Every structure is written in structure tokens, then in C-alpha cells.
Amino acid sequence: MTATVAHAESAPSNATTTPARKRWSVAEVEALFALPFNDLVFRAQQVHRENFEPNAVQRSTLLSIKTGGCSEDCGYCSQSSRYDTGLEKESLLPLGEVLENARAAKAKGASRFCMGAAWRGPKEKDLAPVLDMVREVKKLGLETCVTLGMLKDGQAEQLKDAGLDYYNHNIDTSPEFYGQIITTHTLQDRLDTLDKVRDAGINVCCGGIVGLGETKKSRAALIAELANMNPPPDSVPINNLVQVEGTPLGNNEAIDPFDFVRMIAAARITMPKSYVRLSAGRQELGDAVQALCFMAGANSIFYGERLLTTENPDADADDKLFARLGLKSF
Ligand code: SAM
Ligand code: DTB
Ligand code: SF4
């Protein structure tokens, strides 16, 4: 099955008992954004409580297993070989070093370990050592996640057989804005990989970034595109751009933090059963805005001092924030 870019009209119901799944139009998501802030957050909190334990937040730790030198031109990324960001290109980490990091993440209280590689996609010779990493990390009792770029036929099945729980592959921005941020692959390429992941029975982790210079309509279109996936992603990371010097977007202005909270709330309302992850850019949001994000339905974070190549709040600082907010982690 090949996915295509989502359209706004309702899908016909083909079963007598199952009602058609709600399809979200861009205008409907824009209408959510236009609600008074309190009304939007209240509604998101209601949806959150109907579907999840209200004070529990899942924690995933990230590790860059292969840093820099990526052939792609994603305008936000420190790891593209096209931009001079001062990042040292590294080869694939040895298994032992990955396991050392995974053990430390588990000891600090992460439940999922997410390994990221700066590839357009893995070559066969690249995949074999990653399969070993997945098998061994899983044995530690952690959920496993990888983000390796676009997959070729058969690779998702190999990852599934190795015990992979989640594959992260973001659509990043709206269909209309995509070509202004990335030209070396298309949104349809990303959707094709997501189909392969889903068909292999791996949980889908798929979200996007804000702060790229997109319009509010483009943000609404990103949310609609995610929510109209069938089924919606199991996990939806919402990243706030980390401005990286040397990238085309390095001097972008940060978005209004309340608009970031609105993104989280819209994700929660439109994808009631998905984990919504408050992802990159938490450092810049501060504690109070993060608390609003949890109130708006975020129930997952990246936990640990580093994202892939940029900084994240210290684990201790997060533990303190969770204690102040009475949040449980898992
Ligand atoms: N190469 C793989 C890919 O593109 O899927 C995996 C790694 S890539 C760094 C994973 C995701 O990180 C991107 O899709 C993007 O959403 C996010 N990301 C990358 N750089 C970022 C930045 N500077 N700020 C916020 N999010 C970023
Ligand atoms: C996702 O949506 N965000 C993570 C993870 N999936 C792989 C990556 C964020 C990267 C932030 C920039 C960096 O550290 O390089
Ligand atoms: Fe490469 Fe992924 Fe960065 Fe794009 S986001 S340049 S594909 S590492």
C-alpha cells in the first residue's frame, strides 16, 4: 500500500458498524489554533485524560550512533555535509560503546533507547551492525528505536526480526513547505518508508519541526497530515527548531512559545491515542512553558543531556521538574 499526501475530505465508511475515521482538514486545525489559549489547552487536557494517565510521562534517551557527513540537505540539520557547522564527522560507534550508553540511560530511568544515524538511508553493510545493536539493547530490557533515514525493501523486516519496537522517521513540515526546507528527497519518499515500517509491524514514530519559518497554516497542515495517517503514528515528536550556526536556518527567530504549546495541544486533540513527545528545543522553552506542554497533552520527552548533536536539559534538572510537577515517569 502506498500512502499519498493527505486531503481534507472524509474517507468513506466501508464497514456497516465502524464509523468513518475522522479526517482533519487544515482549516479545522487552524480553527483549533485560533481558539483562546485556555479553551484550547482545556480541550486538549480533557482529551488527554480520556485516553492516558494524566500525570505519567514516557522517557526516551537518544544516542547518535553515526554522526555527521549526511548527503541530505535538510535546512535545519547540523549533520548535513552541505553546511559548515563545525561538527566532526564520525563513523558508526562500536557496539560496546552503544551498550555502555544504553545501560547508563536505563540506570537513569529511561524506558526507550533511540539510536540515530546521519544517513540518507542505510546500505546493507550499515544495517548488519545496527541489527546487533537493536538485539543487544533489547536484551537490557529497554524498548528500542532507531532513526536511520529511508529504508529499502526488506530492511524494515530485518529490523523487526532483530526486535525493533519503534522506527522514527519524521515528515517534518507541511507538504507545501517541504521543498523549501529539503530538496534531496521528497515527502513522498518519507511516506513510502513509513509504509514499509508499518507493514513490517514496527511502531511508527513520526512528527515534525516548527520554527523553520513556516506559516501557521503550514503548521496546521503538518498536524493534519500526521493525524490523517491511517493509523496515526504511535508516537508524535514535536520538535522546536534548535538553531544551529552554519545551517540555512541558523539565524531563524524562535517561534512564540505559546504557539509551540498550541502545536502540542492540536497534536493531542487530533491524535488522542498517540504519545505526543515534547522533543528537541526543550532547553530553550524553560520550565514554565514545558509545564504548559504537559498540561496540553505532551506525555513523552527525550531524556538525557544530549539529543543527537545538540544539548538537552540535564537528567537531574528533568527529575527536579518532574518532582515539582508531581509527574511520574516510565
Ligand atoms: N537521518 C535520519 C532522518 O532524517 O530521519 C535520522 C536523524 S534526523 C536528525 C531526525 C530528526 O531530527 C529530523 O527529522 C528532524 O525532525 C529532527 N531535527 C534535526 N535537526 C534538528 C534541529 N536542529 N532542531 C530540531 N529538530 C531537528
Ligand atoms: C526527533 O523527532 N527528534 C530527535 C529524534 N527524533 C531523532 C532528534 C532531534 C535532533 C535535534 C538536533 C540535534 O541534536 O542534532
Ligand atoms: Fe541527514 Fe537526517 Fe540531518 Fe536530513 S535530518 S541532513 S537526513 S541526518
Image (spheres, rainbow, N blue to C red):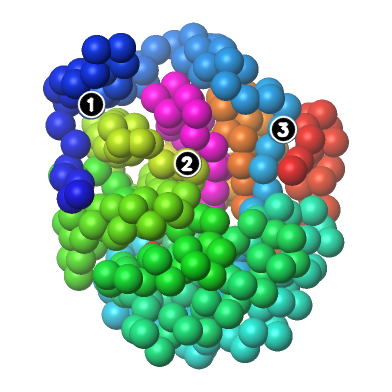
Q: Where is residue 278? Give x, y as percent.
A: 56, 42
Q: Where is residue 185? Give x, y as percent.
A: 20, 66
Q: Where is residue 175? Give x, y as percent.
A: 19, 45
Q: Is residue 191 left or right of residue 126?
A: left
In primary-sequence order, the first of circles 3 and 2 is 3
Closer mark to the observer between disc 3 and disc 1: 3
On the question of residue 44 being in view, the answer is yes
Q: Where is residue 49? Give x, y as percent.
A: 62, 17
In primary-sequence order, the first of circles 3 and 1 is 1
Name the kind of residue labelled 2 in the image. Answer: Asp
What residue is shown with label 1?
26
Q: CA distance from mark 3 to mark 1?
A: 30 Å
Q: Is residue 91 left or right of residue 251?
A: right
Badge 1 marks a residue whose secondary structure is helix
On the question of residue 306 being in view, the answer is no
Q: Residue at x 54, y 37 (%)?
A: 275
Badge 3 marks a residue whose secondary structure is strand
Q: Which residues are magenta?
A: 260-280
Name the kind of residue labelled 3 in the image. Answer: Ala
Closer mark to the observer between disc 1 and disc 2: 2
Query: Which disc, if any, is residue 56?
Result: 3
Q: Nearer the viewer, residue 27 or 143?
A: 143
What residue is shown with label 2?
234
Name the kind of residue labelled 1 in the image. Answer: Val
Q: CA distance from mark 3 to mark 2?
A: 16 Å
Q: Residue at x 58, y 80 (%)?
A: 132
Residue 147's place in the image compared with 55, above or below, is below
Q: Is residue 259 left or right of residue 284?
A: left
